[in-house]
Image (tube, grey):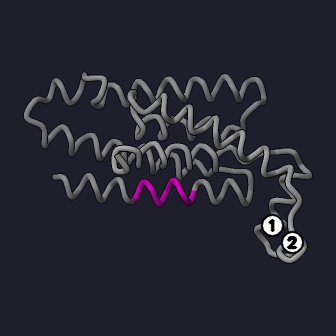
Amino acid sequence: MRDVVVFINSISVLLFLYAAWTDFRTWKIPNTIVLALVTLYALRAMVVIFGSEDVGAALFASSGIGGDVGAGLLMFMLGVVLWAFRLFGAGDAKLFLPIGLFVGWHGMLPFSFLLLVLGVVTLLVLRLPVPLRVAHLAFFMRIGEIRASRKIPYGVLMVFAALLTLALPIIQ
């Protein structure tokens, strides 16, 4: 059972990275990626339930599936509010749901802190000039487009904050 959870988590990391990459390149996060991530979480939840000795604790504990679903719904509602005020794109708002599911209730504070730090660092980095030696490379040309449009692909920041949050227990 543990191997299945690790496999599902590995696929979800790849999908999160793909979502960040598409947001960086196109300012869009496809619905199929968000639905695939939610589906992967549902599969992971079923594996956890079937492998658990105490199904009630696996379902209703704040560190269990109930806490994950609560975090996902709360973050999704926050994303919808930010989208309604035109502070976020719709894809960013939708991406909050699977991020909340995978990060869970206890990961929301570290995720929020990391998102804040990454946002500030990104804003500072976007103010730095691009060295002329690398200005012709596609990545730095895209950075120039982002800088000129003043539209930040927040999905990239959200994904990296989520992945760092998920890696915190491994690092400790």
Given residues 137 and 132, the one toward you in this image is 132
The earlier-in-sequence mark between 1 and 2 is 2
Q: How many numbered discs?
A: 2
At label 2, counting other C-alpha atoms closer than 10 Å, the crowd grade (few under 14, some 14-19, many 20 or more) is some
Q: Secondary structure at mark 1?
A: helix
Distance, label 1 to label 2, CA atoms, is 6 Å
Q: Position of residue 105 (x, y in %)?
A: 39, 27
Mark seen at residue 140? 1
Q: Residue at x 47, y 40 (%)?
A: 98
Q: In the picture, residue 92 is in which quadrant? A: top right
Q: Main SS of the magenta segment?
A: helix
Q: Position of residue 145 (x, y in %)?
A: 87, 58
Taking 133 as reference, is 68 above or below it? above
Q: Three-letter amino acid code at disc 2?
A: Ala
Q: Three-letter amino acid code at disc 1?
A: Phe
Q: Which residues are magenta?
A: 11-18
At label 1, counting other C-alpha atoms closer than 10 Å, the crowd grade (few under 14, some 14-19, many 20 or more) is some
Q: Is residue 156 left or right of residue 2?
A: right
Q: Residue at x 63, y 60 (%)?
A: 21
Q: In the picture, residue 66 is in which quadrant? A: top left
Given residues 159 and 55, the one toward you in this image is 159
- In the rendered image, which residue does mark 2 sit on? 135
In magenta segment, residue 16: yes
Q: Is residue 43 left or right of residue 15?
A: left
Q: Is residue 113 left or right of residue 118?
A: left
In magenta segment, residue 46: no
Q: Position of residue 56 (x, y in %)?
A: 16, 24
| Label 1 close to label 2 by CB (< 8 Å) | yes
Q: Residue at x 80, y 75 (%)?
A: 137
Q: Position of residue 57 (x, y in %)?
A: 18, 25
Taking 9 as reference, is 72 above or below it? above
